[in-house]
Image (cartoon, grey):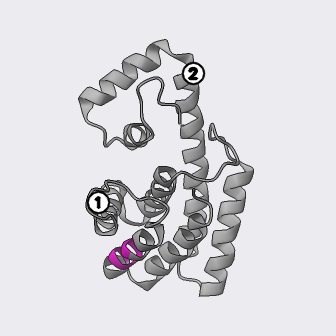
Amino acid sequence: MNTEHGITEKQWMAYLDGSLPESACARIRSHLAVCAECRSMRDQLLAWESAVVQEINRLNAAATRSSGEIDLLAGRFLQRLRENETRPTKGAPFKPVEAVRLMQALLNPLCGAGAARKAVQQANEQSCRAGEADVSVPNWSLFVRNLSKNVGCVYGSPARLLIERVGSLVGTEIH
């Protein structure tokens, strides 16, 4: 995402999920009032997130199915997501911050937005080495393992399996 307007990818994601501090939200809202390019980007991100939520609801409804069925549904999920993509970088590999957001969206209907955000934050902290603040391509698999383990402890093996399968597929789509 374009940072020339002073809004980083991480800030966009936090703004959209409501976890950005109010002072930063106010700055972004002020900027959006005068910048059509960023309003368009926000609208595209919101449309993409809406498509993600629709597909995730289908996946979560199938969480108790067999591993093979979950693999098939997860593959279809990514395929439909790519077909209906409205991100500004349509068709491009996911950036790690987008992939993390997608995994958090997967958890939202399962455990609620607050618990999903905390689970993702905890897995992020468990997966990053000293000096790293965010998940990156090299530690994506570790992030998925930590997230699936943490979620599985509370929500059981179907949830763990769903996180593992989708995380593995998303991992092939990030750069």
- Magenta highlight on residue 47: no
Identify the residue position indicated by label 1 in the image. 118
Quarter assignment of residue 118: bottom left
Q: Earlier in the sequence, mark 2 or mark 1?
A: 2
**Residue visible at 58% across and 53% down in the picture:** 94
Give the structural element (helix, strand or loop) at label 1: helix
Mark 2, secondary structure of its residue: helix
In the figure, is residue 103 to the left or right of 88?
left
As drawn, the residue found furthest toward the right would be: 83
Q: How many C-alpha atoms fall within 10 Å of the one at disc 2: few (<14), some, or many (≥20)?
A: few
Q: Is residue 16 left or right of residue 36?
A: left
Residue placed farthest to the top in the image? 34
Q: Distance from label 2 to label 1 (Cα)?
A: 31 Å
Position of residue 128 relative to residue 168, above or below, is: above
Residue under pointer 2: 37
Residue 54 picture location, percent across and down: 59, 55
Q: Which mark is residue 8?
A: none
Give the amino acid at mark 2: Glu
Residue 115 place in picture, x, y as percent: 30, 61
Residue at (57%, 56%) from the top-left corner?
175
Q: Main secondary structure of the magenta part?
A: helix
- The stretch in magenta equals 146-151
Q: Of the residues shown, which amino acid type is indicated by label 1? A: Lys
Q: Is residue 169 above or below residue 30?
A: below
Q: Position of residue 4 (x, y in %)?
A: 48, 25
Question: What residue do we see at 38% from left, 25% from top?
Answer: 28
Whether residue 9 appears in this view of the structure is yes
**In front of the other: label 2 or label 1?**
2
Q: How far across and down, in percent of the image, does residue 29 sit? A: 39, 22
Is-magenta flag for residue 149? Answer: yes
Residue at the extreme front? 131
Crowding near pointer 1: few (<14 within 10 Å), some, many (20+)? Answer: few
